[in-house]
Amino acid sequence: EVQLVESGGGLVQPGGSLRLSCAASGLPNDDYAIGWFRQFPGKEREGVSCFSSDGYAYYANSVKGRFTVSKDNAKKTVYLQLNSLKPEDTAVYYCAAGMFDPYPSTWYLRALYNYWGQGTQVTVSS
């Protein structure tokens, strides 16, 4: 059984930082792209970042330069470092795994991801 478990969310002041983790288990191989998405109330889930199986990183324009995605292969965990957080970053953040090679025009397409975590809340507020 494939499981993706996010952790690391919480309440942080504007300008602060958080590190989200996505621990994966049960994936049949390492040829999976891991994506990070977020969902605002009443909105569709949107792509934030993606880490490909061969080490390429992709970012939404809204987070480029503030968020950094990385992967620890030994721990089968993908991290999303959130810096310089803004109130508009407040959302539920999800990680997802998809067996595809992401490109700039595809990494954010939800339909390409096969497995999803349960989400973790990030709240940026003073």
Image: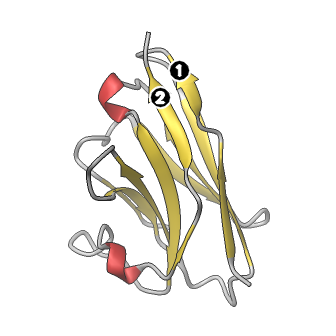
* Left or right position of 50 against 79: left
Pick the quarter of the image with the N terminus.
bottom right
- Provide the residue designation for mark 2: 123
Q: In which quarter of the image is residue 64?
A: top left
Kindly identify which residue carries mark 1: 12
105 versus 118 height, above or below? below
Q: What element carries label 2?
A: strand
Q: Can residue 18 be seen in this view?
A: yes
Q: In this view, does 33 lie to the left or right of 74?
A: left
> Quick one: 89 or 59, which is closer to the camera?
89
Amino acid found under the numbered disc labelled 1 = Val
Residue 1 or residue 29, whichever sits in front: 1
Is the Cβ of the residue at disc 1 closer than 8 Å to that at disc 2?
A: yes
Q: Quadrant of residue 26?
A: bottom right
Q: In which quarter of the image is the C terminus?
A: top left
The residue sitting at 37% across, 82% down in the picture is 112
Rendered position, 53 above or below 83: below
Q: Which residue lies furthest to the front in this view?
A: 42
Q: Residue at x 41, y 16 (%)?
A: 14
75 left or right of 105 in image: right
User: What residue do we see at 26% from left, 75% from top?
Assistant: 106
The Cα–Cα distance between marks 1 and 2, rounded to whole angstroms, is 6 Å
